[in-house]
Amino acid sequence: MTDNHYDVVVVGLGIMGAGALYQAAKRGAKTLGLDQFAPPHTYGSSHGDTRITRQAIGEGEMYMPFIQRSNEIWRELETVTHRQLYLATGGLIIAPEGGGAQFHARSDFVARTASIATAYGIDHEVLTDQETMQRYPLLKLRPQDIAYYEPGAGVLRPELCIQTQLEQAVHYGATIHTNETVTTYETTARGVRITTNKGRYDAGRIVLAMGAWLPDLLAAEHRPGVDIYRQVIYWFEAEDITAFTEHNFPFVIWIGDTAADFFSAFPAMRDGLQGVKVLTEQYAQTTTAQTIDRTVKAEEIAHLYHMTNTRLHGVRDKLVHADVCLYTVTPDEHFILDFHPDSERVVIASPCSGHGFKHAAAIGETLAELALNGRSTLDISQFSLARLKTLE
Ligand SMILES: Cc1cc2nc3c(=O)[nH]c(=O)nc-3n(C[C@H](O)[C@H](O)[C@H](O)COP(=O)(O)OP(=O)(O)OC[C@H]3O[C@@H](n4cnc5c(N)ncnc54)[C@H](O)[C@@H]3O)c2cc1C
């Protein structure tokens, strides 16, 4: 075996690729991770200080084994590294009673989440508008709003989750090349030949965990019908930031009457940006990873401040920071975790649609298992590429 031959090459070291590399290396495989930038970075989908994680997954019961396994892996990593990757801040999902707009393509998200929580014995409450505001006086609910409250929900630290898994991958012998772009790959009878802007490598199997860049490396006929959307994360100045810190303020997912009303607010981390992190989602305009506009305009900031001010007390009309981020969205807003239709040597991962991070540790393990054993412990049948054909 030459120095340039690996059991597994992982292309893309965002949260999914970092997890795959760590898990493959931990299993003793000779692994190489490649990224066009130097992760953790701010150009893809895995940055912004915090990511929401919940125990009851309203997006569907098929995600429950992924969240349960992810939580085990985050804890294992915390124990080994003495770092805090996850904080239980409590979390609220607010929506008009009776449903409101769809969230992640599911209607009546509060009732769905509460029903899954009940089925799995997850501690939760469904609160009225008044009960919610009594508990969290910084929130402004409308009389028609109710809230699902989960005390064990919280936030993950995305940059630290990536860094920790990459460091652990290296600890188990992985090689990492940053600032190296994969330009093509071809499958042969014996493996996969990967070409980058700096060299060539051979692998038994390859994992494509390229986020919004995934369509770039697939032939036109095999591109899954994903759409890329530009999203923006904002941090606004608080009158008193301590009121928004992780021990005082939960994360809030706010489902309104229409998709455009969607709003989310996050607890401020003591070691993070000193501002109140808020965002909305937009699905009106698609973009590509290559052409995305990374400047945030004054009218966008004004719109987000207006949304924030109608939902939260104590936030000033002063931007601390803004970051552009990418959603890679499938037509049914479920993930893609599958082999390439032409070759089981190529594993394809597109677990975003705006809700992938919380499942990422288990997805990394799943990708490593697919690459090393050709099958996974967790059921991925509902994340197949073939199902997308039936949606066309
Ligand atoms: C604003 C925002 C908020 C979100 N909030 C949540 C949340 O609260 N909870 C939740 O669970 N999920 C959330 N998500 C979704 C979650 O963050 C994503 O599912 C996850 O980050 C996707 O990670 P990834 O590794 O697939 O992609 P990325 O992080 O984009 O990683 C892809 C990597 O591939 C590299 N790459 C691409 N092409 C090449 C190439 N040719 N050669 C070498 N390297 C390459 C890129 O440089 C990049 O590092 C959110 C997403 C966004 C954008």
Image (cartoon, rainbow, N blue to C red):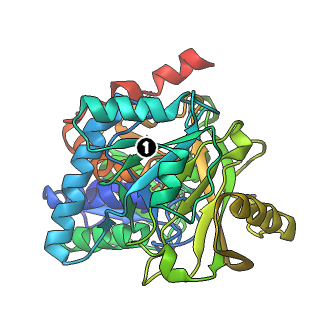
Depth check: 256 or 355 in front? 256
For residue 272, say whether it is visible: yes
Respond yes or no on whether mark 1 lies under 8 Å from ligand 1: yes
Packing grade of label 1 (10 A; few <14, some 14-19, many >=20) is many
For residue 30, say whether it is visible: no
| Quadrant the N terminus occupies | bottom left
Residue type, label 1: Ala
Question: What is the tally of numbered marks visible in this picture?
Answer: 1
The quadrant in which residue 81 appears is bottom left
Q: Residue at x 51, y 67 (%)?
A: 47
Query: Mark 1 = which residue?
Result: 349
Depth check: 372 or 78 in front? 78
Q: Quick check: 124 above or below 202?
A: above
The quadrant in which residue 156 appears is bottom left
Q: Residue furthest top?
A: 390
Q: Residue at x 55, y 67 (%)?
A: 197
Depth check: 220 or 127 in front? 127
Left or right: residue 215 compared with residue 180: right
Q: Residue furthest right?
A: 299
Estimate the x, y position of residue 74 in percent, counting from the top left: 24, 60
Is disc 1 placed on a helix, strand or loop? strand
Q: Residue at x 57, y 27 (%)?
A: 98
